[in-house]
Image (tube, rainbow, N blue to C red):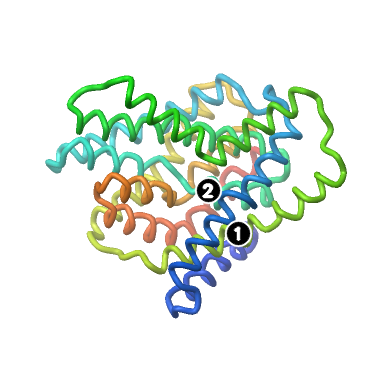
Amino acid sequence: MIEIFLKTLPFFALIALGFQSGRTGFFTAEATAYLTKFVFYFALSAMLFRFAANLSLSEIFDWWFVAAYLWGCGVVYLLATAVAFIRGIGLQEAAVEAQCSVIGNTGFLGVPMLVVLLGEAAAGPVLMVLAIDLIVFSSLITILITGSRDGRMSLAILGTVGKGLLRNPMIVSIALGLIWSAASLPIPDVANEFLGILGAAATPGALFAIGASLAGKSAERMSVAAWLSFCKLVLHPGAVAIAALVLFPVAAFDAAVMISASALPVAGNVYILAQHYGVAPQRVSAAILVSTAISIVTVSLVIAWVTPLL
């Protein structure tokens, strides 16, 4: 456990450095926004394309893997939604809270950290988790909120979802990488070197940006934030573990990566969606802040637990 904790500590130390830089004003909110944009559209996209271009679809996609992850997510998603309804809140806020309970920071934290900690072979399963989160659950929250406001489902909602996916550089870079791989095209040495240099900026840049963005977030409504953090850091990896290790025939290594990815703290893109739709952004902000702080310990515990499966 201590060895795993020491391996994860540098990643969280970079987050802490970004947080302190943001808190002191050395790194302004505007600077954070531009750094995040650089990582999102350039560095992380280069990393994801390079990973995907060196993998085949068969190495990434597995029906049992998808079924296990969706089962684990679905159980926690429904539980968080039920608790929200019991507390008397509406569908839109319940959808946002449910999103917090299952969507981890796979893009900015999971891809850089888990590939380093678990090895290059972890890239495929991590990309699969990221793709499911982006395609299934980002679409689901859009459909639920928009449909709730319109009072009905329509083709216009599906158009909004489709445009959102096509504009997401993470989805685009993974898809283009897989297309490149399927065409059996080698990446030219110059291009590969370029992607390697640019992609190497994703890890420190993403972690620093996470910390700097957290500096502007508040921890209001701590009871709700604590509940959502418990869902994300404990219930989510627990449910995914039951699905991957007991209910579905998922390969041991892939299960270990899936469980580790599910233990990540609440993703920043949930806050972006909440702010965009004007639904409980402060609640999401608190959940991100609290879950990220606690995950310094819980992520290490989960990775230490699944290490024998590797």
Whether tag 1 and tag 2 are in contact, CB under 8 A, the answer is no
What's the mark number on residue 8?
Answer: 1
Element under disc 1: helix
- Numbered marks: total: 2
Q: Toward the viewer: 49 or 292?
A: 49
Q: Is residue 32 above or below residue 93?
A: below
Element under disc 2: helix
Residue at point 31% right, 65% down? 218
Q: Is residue 79 above or below residue 6?
A: above
Q: Residues within 10 Å of mark 1 (few under 14, many from 20)?
A: many
Residue type beneath disc 1? Thr
Q: Toward the viewer: 72 or 271?
A: 271
The percent coordinates of residue 216 (x first, y second) are 38, 67
Reading the image, the residue beneath label 2 is: 302
Q: Is residue 208 left or right of residue 29?
A: right
Q: Is residue 107 left or right of residue 49?
A: left
* Upstream in sequence: badge 1 or badge 2: 1
Extreme residue toward the right, this view? 189
Residue 290 occupies quadrant: bottom left
Q: Residues within 10 Å of mark 2 (few under 14, many from 20)?
A: many
The percent coordinates of residue 126 (x first, y second) are 60, 39
The percent coordinates of residue 93 (x first, y second) are 23, 42
The C terminus: image quadrant = top right
The N terminus: image quadrant = bottom right
Q: Is residue 127 above or below residue 298?
A: above
What's the mark number on residue 221?
Answer: none
Mark 1–mark 2 distance (CA, rounded to whole Å): 12 Å
Residue type beneath disc 2? Val
Extreme residue toward the left, this view? 88
The percent coordinates of residue 260 (x first, y second) are 55, 44
